[in-house]
Image (cartoon, rainbow, N blue to C red):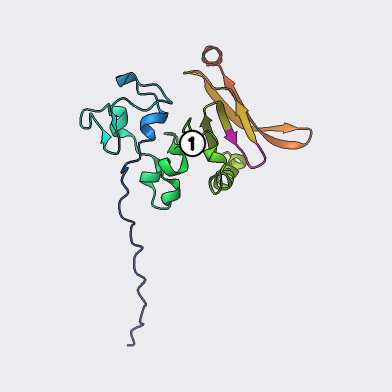
Amino acid sequence: MAHAETASTPARQRAPLKACGDCNLCCKVYDVDDVGKKAGTLCQHTRESAGCGIWGLHPQMCQDFKCLWLKHDDLNGLWRPDTAGFVLRLEPNGTTLNIDVDPDRPDAWLKHPYYKQLKLWSEGIYRSENLVVVYAPEGLYVVTPEEDLFLRKPKRGDILETGMEMTLFGPRPFARVIPAAQAKLRA
């Protein structure tokens, strides 16, 4: 009986684990209530090029957070938050990609190659598969293939509603903020 020879394909090597290094943009763009830190200002516990000054005692929110650049091998160094000028994260639903922009670089998400890739990722809105939302200093943008839908900054508890609606010119993406008080009445 003849034995067929099979060529073995080497397993894809996993990239070396990524580390924050001296990137600390997540320490700037998010509210951290436990230490009284507001979004847009660098955390008072951040040490220049040395990470967190209260590491080990830092808030649970900070301990649990990992940006998408850290989590995904396919995002190269251009997507590292301090290089890109924004932090990528997924909502717990796994379908909403959030881009949290550094207030000192408000247009970073619009630059090459980022904007083009965000537009490609946004194509899932047509199939209600995913959503791309940019949180910029002036408000938020729901990125769609045709246009970026701008909404003033929602308040805590407000609901972002998105989808497709029929217009005279065919289906078109929409986005709106429903104030928290109004959302409670709908429920």
Q: Find residue 87 and report its horizontal and vertical position in percent.
A: 43, 37
Q: Residue furthest bottom?
A: 1
Closer to us: 97 or 126? 97
Which residue is the extreme one toward the right? 168
Q: Is residue 143 magenta?
A: yes
Q: Tell me if residue 8 can be seen.
A: yes
Q: Which secondary structure is most common in the magenta stretch?
A: loop
Which residue corresponds to the image point at 53% horizontal and 21% vertical from the top-left?
154
What element does badge 1 sit on? strand
Q: Position of residue 178 (x, y in %)?
A: 57, 19
Residue farthest to the left, as pictured: 56
Q: Quadrant of residue 167 in the image?
A: top right
Point 58% across, 38% down: residue: 128
Residue marked by disc 1: 99
Residue 148, given in percent of the width and then of the height, sits at 63, 35
Q: Is residue 58 left or right of residue 4?
A: left
* Side (left or right) of 96 relative to 164: left
Q: Which residues are magenta?
A: 142-147
Question: Relative to residue 115, is residue 36 depicted above or below?
Answer: above
Kindly identify the amino acid type of the residue bearing the numbered disc 1: Ile
